[in-house]
Image (spheres, helix red, strand yellow):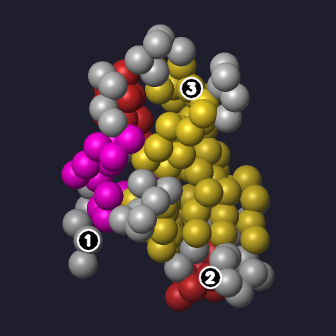
């Protein structure tokens, strides 16, 4: 059983930003974070729960910025949540635009849980890979 990470969304992004800004290597960014469960709050943007192989939800999060070693800042304001198949029915009761509290695990797969991925010479994105998302609570 994974342990819960005691960082809210803002503290998590702040910690990741400090690691990225300090030049931590790609392999080290998720040290101590991979395999931990988080519990965060966001707003449901998109839902694809009918895909039997990969049900998922997109959640809008409070925008934060991660500073790169070169001083550039990457905005992060959303997450894609792969839904645990045992939790799909719970998520089907949620509407787009609903505020939800969810629990998910920071990936411990071969792909890093946290990664800065260059998409062009001048732009990068911050990847936060989560798995096994379950619904904790949703607005009525």
The picture quadrant where one finds residue 14 is top left
9 versus 96 height, above or below: above
All told, the count of numbered labels is 3
Residue sitting at x 37%, y 22%: 21
Q: Kindly check if marks 2 and 3 are in contact, taking CB atoms under 8 A apart as contact.
A: no
Q: Kindly check if marks 1 and 2 are in contact, taking CB atoms under 8 A apart as contact.
A: no
Q: Report the side of 111 relative to 31 (left or right).
A: right
Provide the secondary structure element on which disc 3 rests.
strand
Q: CA distance from mark 1 to mark 3?
A: 29 Å
Q: CA distance from mark 1 to mark 2?
A: 21 Å
Residue sitting at x 41%, y 35%: 13
Q: Kindly check if marks 1 and 3 are in contact, taking CB atoms under 8 A apart as contact.
A: no
User: Residue lying farthest top?
Assistant: 71
Residue sitting at x 39%, y 59%: 106
The range drawn in magenta is: 26-40
The picture quadrant where one finds residue 38 is bottom left
**Mark 1 or mark 3, which has the lower sequence index?**
1
- The quadrant of the picture occupied by the N terminus is bottom left
Q: Between label 1 and label 3, give the one nearer the viewer.
A: 3
Badge 3 is on which residue? Answer: 74
| In the foreground, 57 or 32 | 32
**Mark 2 or mark 3, which has the lower sequence index?**
3
Badge 2 is on which residue? Answer: 88
Mark 1: few, some, or many residues within 10 Å (few <14, many ≥20)?
A: few
37 versus 21 height, above or below: below
Provide the secondary structure element on which disc 2 rests.
helix
Residue 95 located within the stretch drawn in magenta: no
Q: Main secondary structure of the magenta part?
A: loop
Q: Report the side of 98 relative to 138 (left or right).
A: right
Mark identifier at residue 2:
1
């Amino acid at each position: 059983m994974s342990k819960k990470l005691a960082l809210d969304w803002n503290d998590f992004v702040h910690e990741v930003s400090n690691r990225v800004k300090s030049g931590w290597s790609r392999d080290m960014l998720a040290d101590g974070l991979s395999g931990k469960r988080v519990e965060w709050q966001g707003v449901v943007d998109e839902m694809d729960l009918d895909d039997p192989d990969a049900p998922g939800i997109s959640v809008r999060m409070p925008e934060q910025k991660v500073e790169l070693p070169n001083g550039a800042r990457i905005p992060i304001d959303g997450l894609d949540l792969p839904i645990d198949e045992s939790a799909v029915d719970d998520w089907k009761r949620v509407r787009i635009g609903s505020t939800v509290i969810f629990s998910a695990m920071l990936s411990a797969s071969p792909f890093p849980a946290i990664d800065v991925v260059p998409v062009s010479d001048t732009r990068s994105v911050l990847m936060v890979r989560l798995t096994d998302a379950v619904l904790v609570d949703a607005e009525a």
